[in-house]
Image (cartoon, coloured by chain):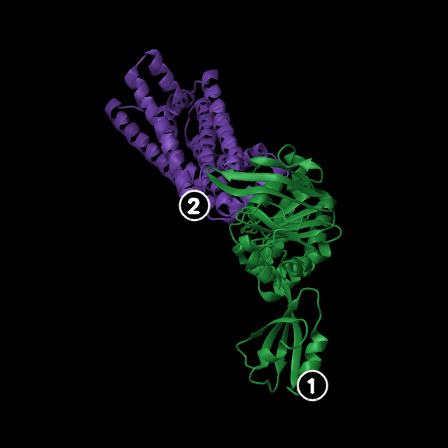
Chain colours: A purple, B green
């Protein structure tokens, strides 16, 4: 699929020429590092306290105290920064009138959508790879179980994919990048709040459906080290659905 | 090459174009002339398969624009009104991107890029960011984009807008050089442009085609009489009346300049010799005498402003009048 390749390369080029990637990546890495630092220091303080109380070395579970908290906080960081990364994807094409060029080039709308999604996803995965410095350095000085860390990263990768797809969809409906960013904030916050509504409704069928629709619960499972097909299906189908909707919007813009 | 048959496009209650029909033969350059908002861009968007027509059909190189958009897109080079360039890319990066979307790769891509950069004289700026280029260069990059795959059909939406006179001439020369091997539709609201580069002109107003012909014939058709402008060194006080004595003269009009009069006679009659002999015979000092032909500008204004007054005759006029 050479056209998809061409679009990916062009998008990556555009991202790295503009300051967006550096700002968003910098803020993400800084926040991630700072959160990690806070949880580690906090855990250390707790360890000292426990040691003093017990009079001997205390058993501290880094997985529970550092990584679970870190992964849980990171989803909110992603919710805030990923829409900034995706807002330009289609809105800018409309604003700068290059949209008409793409639509009259002999390529399919699906190739445009997929190419743009892959490019932004690659950037996100690159950002995540840089964060692995935290568990890697921690592994030098302490013991923890790697498995939940891996599943936590799997959770982040899937969650990020969904957020980016939502962002791409939001970018398809407008030519204003600010509107695109706020639309994806809104959609993601709604999905977050659905978790609250779900727990309010409790174990009723409605409650289960609403909870399933929120990204929160599925992510928690993965962070705790539970890999359930149900959760994987949720993320993959959610991502595909959002990309499909973006495809429909772009395609239908010809019919207006 | 291009055949448009009774296409209508409505946006809700607004009719952007109304039963427009025309055709462009192979190698022909057609000007699509009309005031802003006449429906030029809409027609071009339908031809490029960007938007579908509400009614009617359009064919490019034998393919239906609505039914076979992929085939149509392959055969068209399209330059929209705003050059569709990515500011953050360099010229060669941009052309490489366009070429890849068009299915080129490897040496084929390099060849296509070199060819088009040479044709549009972009070699010296190929490594510069498009954001830093002047308007004229951006327009040329936009044209390079439309030409990279050497398409049989070119659709250019106001290609000379915003350029300086030298650049306008360059672009026009380029379009002229494309004639013969490419079919070109060029939209413009600048009249001399249509005369300068096109073999045929379609005038569109309010979404309807009001005339279609060669530039010369269009002005000939709308001329109701032959006019001669005569300038005299020492005109008599009643020059206008005196000239009426010349056989064949129908009207004589005075102008703002007291030395110049406009003499009208019936269409197809040449009375210049008689007028000259008359003026010289009376020793009025004939300084200048020239036929006044209707410019395309006059034709255009006449067609788009006073449609009702048009002589309802020629079979080349398509569409109905109000």
**Viewer-proximal residue among B230 and B172:** B230
x, y percent for residue B166 = 62, 66
**Viewer-proximal residue among B208 and A60:** B208
User: Which element is circle 1 on?
Assistant: helix
Please name the residue that numbered disc 2 is placed on: A23
- Seen in the picture, residue B51 relative to A192 is either above or below; the reply is below
x, y percent for residue B64 = 66, 35
Direction right: furthest residue: B180
Which dot marks residue A240? Answer: none
Residue B48 visible from this viewpoint? no
Left/right placement of residue A44 relative to residue B240 reads left
x, y percent for residue B164 = 57, 64
Please name the residue that numbered disc 1 is placed on: B281
- Seen in the picture, residue B70 relative to B299 is either above or below; the reply is above
Q: Residue at x 41, y 21 (%)?
A: A218
Q: Residue at x 56, y 82 (%)?
A: B238
């Amino acid at each position: 699929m050479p056209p998809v390749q061409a679009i990916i390369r062009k998008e990556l080029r555009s991202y790295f020429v503009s300051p967006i990637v550096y700002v968003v990546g910098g803020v993400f890495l800084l926040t991630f590092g700072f959160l990690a630092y806070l949880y580690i220091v906090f855990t250390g303080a707790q360890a000292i306290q426990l040691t003093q109380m017990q009079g001997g070395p205390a058993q501290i579970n880094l997985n529970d105290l550092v990584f679970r908290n870190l992964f849980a906080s990171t989803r909110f960081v992603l919710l805030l920064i990923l829409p900034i990364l995706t807002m330009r994807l289609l809105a800018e094409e409309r604003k700068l009138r290059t949209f008409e060029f793409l639509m009259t080039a002999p390529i399919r709308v699906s190739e445009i959508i997929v190419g743009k999604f892959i490019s932004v996803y690659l950037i996100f995965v690159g950002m995540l790879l840089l964060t692995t410095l935290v568990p890697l350095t921690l592994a030098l000085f302490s013991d923890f179980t790697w498995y939940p860390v891996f599943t936590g990263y799997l959770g982040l990768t899937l969650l990020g994919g969904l957020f980016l797809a939502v962002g791409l969809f939001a970018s398809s409906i407008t030519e204003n990048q600010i509107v695109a960013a706020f639309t994806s904030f809104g959609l993601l916050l709604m999905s977050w709040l659905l978790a609250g509504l779900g727990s309010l409704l409790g174990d009723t069928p409605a409650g289960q459906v609403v909870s399933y629709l929120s990204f929160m619960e599925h992510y928690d499972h993965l962070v705790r080290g539970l890999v359930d097909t149900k959760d994987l299906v949720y993320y993959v189908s959610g991502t595909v659905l959002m990309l499909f909707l973006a495809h429909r919007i772009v395609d239908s813009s010809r019919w207006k | 090459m291009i055949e448009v048959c009774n296409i209508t496009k409505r946006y809700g209650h607004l009719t952007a174009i109304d039963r427009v029909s025309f055709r462009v033969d192979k190698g022909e350059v057609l000007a699509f002339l009309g005031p802003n908002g006449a429906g030029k861009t809409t027609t071009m968007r339908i031809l490029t398969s960007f938007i579908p027509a509400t009614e009617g059909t359009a064919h490019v190189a034998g393919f239906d624009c609505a039914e076979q958009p992929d085939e149509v897109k392959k055969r068209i080079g399209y330059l929209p009104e705003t050059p569709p360039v990515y500011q953050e890319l360099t010229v060669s990066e941009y052309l490489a991107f366009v070429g890849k979307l068009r299915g080129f790769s490897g040496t084929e891509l390099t060849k296509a890029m070199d060819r088009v950069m040479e044709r549009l004289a972009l070699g010296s700026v190929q490594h510069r960011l498009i954001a830093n280029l002047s308007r004229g260069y951006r327009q040329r990059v936009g044209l390079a984009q439309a030409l990279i795959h050497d398409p049989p059909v070119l659709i250019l939406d106001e290609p000379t807008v915003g350029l300086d006179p030298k650049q306008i001439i360059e672009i026009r020369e380029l379009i002229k050089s494309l004639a013969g091997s490419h079919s070109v539709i060029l939209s413009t609201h600048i009249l001399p442009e249509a005369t300068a580069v096109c073999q045929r002109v379609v005038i569109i107003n309010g979404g309807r085609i009001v005339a279609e012909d060669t530039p010369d014939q269009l002005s000939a058709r709308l001329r109701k009489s032959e006019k001669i402008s005569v300038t005299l060194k020492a005109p008599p006080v009643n020059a206008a009346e005196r000239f009426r004595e010349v056989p064949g003269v129908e009207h004589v009009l005075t102008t703002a300049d007291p030395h110049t009069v406009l003499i009208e006679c019936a269409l197809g009659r040449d009375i210049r010799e008689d007028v000259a002999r008359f003026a010289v015979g009376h020793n009025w000092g004939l300084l200048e005498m020239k036929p006044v032909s209707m410019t395309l500008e006059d034709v255009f204004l006449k067609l788009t402003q006073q449609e009702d007054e048009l002589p309802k005759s020629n079979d080349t006029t398509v569409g109905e009048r109000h």
